[in-house]
Each structure stands twice: as structure tokens, then as C-alpha cells.
Amino acid sequence: MSTRTIASLFALHVIAAISATHGEQVLVDLGEPLDLRAIPARAVALSLRGEGKGRALRLETNTGHAWPGIDLKAPGGKWDLSKHGHVAVDVTNCGTKEVTVCLRVDNPGADGRKNCLTERVELKPGSEGTITVKLPQGSAAGESLQFVGMRGTPIDGAAKLDPGNVVNLVIFTPKPKTAHAFEVTNIRAGGKPDRGSSGDLPDPFFPMIDEFGQYMHKDWPGKTHSLGEMHSRIAEEATDLATHPGPEGWNRFGGWAKGPQLEATGFFRVAKHRDKWWLVDPEGRLFWSNGIDGIRDANATPITGREHYYAALPAEDSPFGQFYSPGKWAPRGYYKDKGGYRQYDFTRANLLRKYGVNWQDRFAGLSHRRLRSWGVNTMANWSSEAIYLKRKTPYVVAVHFGSPDLRASKGMWKKFSDVFDPGFREGLAKRLAREAGKSAGDPWCIGYFVDNELGWGKDVSLAVATLCCPADQPAKRAFVADLKAKYREIAALNTAWGTSHSSWEALLAAMGAPDVKKAGGDLRDFYSKTAETYFRTVREEVKRIAPEQLYLGCRFSNRNDRAVRAAAVYCDVISFNRYTYSVERDRLPKGIDKPMIIGEFHFGALDRGMFHTGLRKADNQEHRAKLYTEYLRGALRNPQLLGAHWFIYKDQATTGRGDGENYQIGFIDNCDTPHPEIIAAAREIGATMYRLRLAE
């Protein structure tokens, strides 16, 4: 059946009626007769429940597709939604597992990234929610502007979607690991267009960034308008910190001084107490790691090719010229493969303006006082050594190191290491040697995260990548040696795998992937061996240099049970970066009873002069604080979680870092001004977290 025929059939049952009462446009009237067979569906069974206006469209999805869902085509080819501010759908989770449901609004040519916008809702069993996709509103000036090097731009997504030419709505679940059942109702467009910063753009638009690194064409609470205003905030914050010295009942480490007394070893350790996993601080007190990543002053943004964005870049020979520097880190985005760029750090310049020539020491000391006042007891990953080695707040250390690649592997940040190459252990040992006399043996150091968000892939991917490497790859030689020991003759392997290699040397020389169905058992076995070798080697080297510190894992970004099971054998704590709205129900694979820690989570909003919300959006600062509170309360209720770390201390640069990230995800902005809403939420959590954790 052609797309045109499907659209025509479905259009018979779609009404674009306007509700005079609420100003909403019904996009799909579920109360009318519907031919469900005319709705394009992927791995979904459709049915209708209820009657009349209360009728719901039920979707029962399975795992037979990466994106199971449906397309709702616009009647007549398109909806003109330019007079509305959003598209929304109400969703009810009818299943027994938590489900993520997405709504995608498409222009012609949508592919999931281009010409579309997507939002999601995460629902516990039996709960209801609404997915709302905000429709961007451009202007004549905005349509002609070109932005590079930023994930979000001042024209508020207008480059990704034209509200006047919406052709399709997609409702789906992203990469589900189990079957789900949910119902959708009230599929509508509504609200008034919110022009925001994009509706009244000045002409000319550039420059758009002021001397402090802020967006020039908009105002917001907390924006810095002058040097005098910046200086006045020093005294204001000093009063605030004195008024809020920190949670009562904490000891010097941030452990629960008024709670149970356990064995004191002089270092952090893990223990199970009343069926919940905890950290135990050096004094033997229960400790739950409530942390913030990136306690550091650096926050540079590339300026090469974008010099016209900035109104007041300083002269090289001025006191602020010291904050220019060369940059080359760009794993993706506009600056990738450009051979480097020139960058400027507005945050450091602002700290010099605010605190004077000893700004680094003042910022370091202030950061420790802030965290204590805010109820935060851990300086988390990527924090500055110069700050955490003041030893006033417990900290973790981020360990990254150079080692030989598994050449055919893939990853978000880098290729996977060849853990069978001696250079893997050598590179790690060289990096860890730098911790001797600093974090190694330091009672304030909780432990080490080694690596971050590696490309673990599916449970055969590393083994397949190994076979796609050249013959001199040590991992490939190890894999072929294992196969030779198992099958003895190449003919036996060929029979099992359905291959036709003439010899073991020919298998080594081949650089293609076998049939995963036929070779799957061997591929999974070598994947497990790779994971086990990785975690065992890292543990041995961590404990060799720092036997008293904890090995906190690799910060999984995607869940792979085979890799997690290997981590459980060797890690003291298994770490995950979990950008979701709740981790209360997160658990390790069946049969594993080990502690977990969240290495990253965040929420951001667009009401403080920034252009991107980050990986999980909030409506505004109040909503961001609420989401933060709910996330941490859920984490405290999870018996396997002994901590959660927010990413990150400062909002990212307005015009982005080397990979373009420019998220509003900080506790402070780039002028060193705290965001009061999330700080108030943090203080509430810090004051109650130990009682909540133990009581639950």
C-alpha cells in the first residue's frame, strides 16, 4: 500500500477541529471510527479502548524493532500548526514495567535527527503523563542566521522544524528491552506561540555575546549587567553561606555523625547495613555520596570562525588576554577534524573580575564552602586536583589514559582499548603512578572512576570488532588462539560457523564479521573474556597503587548485562551515567548483589539565557529543582545505590565547548552566580537524606 493511500484512508478518520473553549486543535479524534489497519505500525499491536470522547488508542509493543511505534499522518498532507505553541499527547502506562514513550513531530524529510523534534515521558506502571513538544517560532531575521559549534541556538529549534508544515506524528518507545502496553489519548495542538528570544531578534543580530560571555538579546533573573553587580554578589553570597553552614548531624567528611557507628578503617569502604548498600566514611559513619561533577574553574569555548559572535573579546596584551588558549578536543560537532581551534574562557575571566588576582584560591575555597552549605558531600568526577586536594570535601578521581585501540571498535568518545595488548596495562599503570603521594592513600579520596561511557555495545559487538581488525591486533590473536584450542581444526570451525577459511592464518588475515547466529556462542564467550580482562586489569592496577581506595567502575552509559556481570566481579562499586527522570527501580542483573553509584544525571531549562536544556529538560528553574529532588529521593530509596552525582557544577559556555555542548545544567552560571532554586532543593535533600535512606 502506498504512503498516499495510507494517508488518504487514515484522513477519513482524522479531524482538525478547533475547540472554542480551550483553543486546542484536535489532531486525531479517537472518538470517531478508525481503520487501525491503515495506521503504519512497527512491532506494535493496536486496539481501541473505551467509548466516545474517553476512547484511547492502546499500543502493545514488542522488541522486534529498535523503535516500535506508529505514524499518524496529517490529513491532506500536512497540519499548519503555526498558530499553536505545542503538540501534546496524554499517555497511560498499562504494563508492569516502567516505559519511556516518545512523541516526534515531523516535517518532510524527518529522519529522527533532522526536520523533526522529539520529547518523551517516563512512566511507572499504572501512572499517567503528558508528552509535550514545544513548537519553535522563528522570525524573518532568525531564518537567515547561521550558527555553528552549538547544540542549541538562540532561534530555539526553528532550524529543525517548521510548525506550518507538520506532516506526521510518531509515537514510539526507544530501543525497549521488554514488551510494553500503553494507551494514548487527547492528541492535540494547543497553546499560543511563544516567540521568546527568537520572536523579536534585533537586526543586525551579531554580536550576540557580551563581555561576560552571556547572551546579549535577552534578560533573566540573575543575569550580570555590570562589574558592580558582580562584586555586590560576593557579600550577598557570604551572608547566605553563613546563614546556611550545612546540614546538622554531619561529621567533617559529610557522613552521618548522629547515625549508626560502624567499624572505622581510616578510609572509605562499602558495607551493607539494614539491607541497603552504603559507603562508610573513615570515621565509621554511614555516608551516601551526594556529589557534583566538574568542580573546576575552566570553561573555555571555541572562537575560531565565530569571532563575530562576541561583542568584547579582550586584547591579547590585556589582563584578560591570558584566557585565550589553543584547543583541539572535538570528538564530534563542527570542530571535529578541523585540526584545532582558538578558544576563550569567559568563566575564568569573570572570576578574575570578581575576586582579583588570587581568584583561583578564592574560587577553590568558596567551592568547598558552597558544597557543604548546599548539603553536597562529594567533589565528583572531573573536579580539579588543585581544589579537591585541599582535603575539605571527600572526592573521587577521574582516570583517563592512553592505550592501544581495538582498531575496528566504535565508541561515543573513543575506540575501545585492546585489553590484550601489554600497552593497555602499561598506559594505565603510568597514569595511576601520578596519584602516588596525592590521592593514593588519602583518607579524603573515596576512589577512582577509570574511563567513561565506553563503547560496550551489544553482547557480541567487541568480539565482532576484534575479528574485523588486522592480523597483528593482539586481541584478534587471543581470540583466534581460543578458537583454535576449542575446535583444533579449522574445518570444525567452518562447520560450526558456516565459513570457509582455508587455515587459522587465513582466519587471522580475514577482516569480516561472521554470521552472528551461527558464531554467537563463541562471540559472546570472547566478549565476556574481553570484559573480564578489562575489569581485572584495571582493578589490579588501581589496588597496586591505592589499595585503600575503591574501584568505582567505568561509568556505563548503556546497559549491557554481560559487561555488567564482569564488572560485578572486580569493581567495588558499579557505576552508571543515567540521564533519566528516576533511578528508583534500577537494579543489577539477577543474582548480583553489589553496590551501584550514579556518575551523571542532570536537568536543564531555557529561562536563564542558555540555548539548550541538556539531556533531560525542565520547563523552568523551579521545575528543574523539583526534578532534581525527585531523582535524588528515588535514588535514596534504591537499596543498591550508595550515591548519585550531578553533571555539572557550572552551566556550560553559552556558545558551547569543543563538541558543541552548551547546556544549562549548572548549580552556578558562567558569572559565578548560584541558581537559587536548585540550591534550595539541594539543601533540603542534604538535610534529610540520611533519615530518608535509613527509614526507607
Image (cartoon, rainbow, N blue to C red):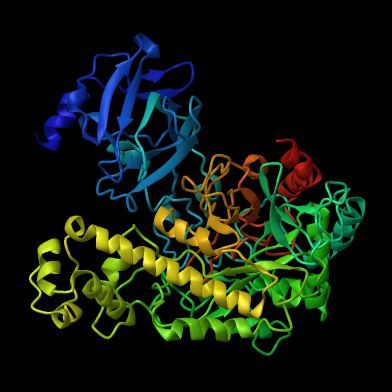
Residue 577 place in picture, x, y as percent: 53, 56
Q: Considering the image in quadrants, where does the N terminus appear?
A: top left
Q: Residue at x 28, y 48 (%)?
A: 110
- Tell me: 691 left or right of 17: right
* Image-based side of 30 in relation to 85, left or right: left
Look at the image and tell me whether residue 413 can be seen.
no
The image shows residue 2 at horizontal and vertical percentages of 10, 36
In this orientation, does residue 13 appear? yes
**Image spot of residue 199 (x, y percent):** 50, 47
Q: Residue at x 49, y 24 (%)?
A: 126
Can you say whether 13 is above or below 581 in the image?
Answer: above
Left/right placement of residue 119 relative to residue 49 reads right
Q: Nearer the viewer, residue 203 or 267?
A: 267
Q: Residue 603, position in %: x, y?
A: 59, 49
Q: Residue at x 54, y 46 (%)?
A: 617
Residue situated furthest bottom in the rendering: 317
Whether 246 is drawn above or below 436: the answer is above
Q: Answer above or below: position of 342 versus 557.
A: below
Query: Which quadrant: the C terminus?
Result: top right
What residue appears at the point 80 percent right and 65 percent down from the top-left corner? 368
Quarter of the image for residue 105 reads: top left
Q: Left or right: 497 with respect to 291?
A: left
**Number of numbered discs visible in the structure rendering:** 0
Q: Nearer the viewer, residue 332 or 411?
A: 411
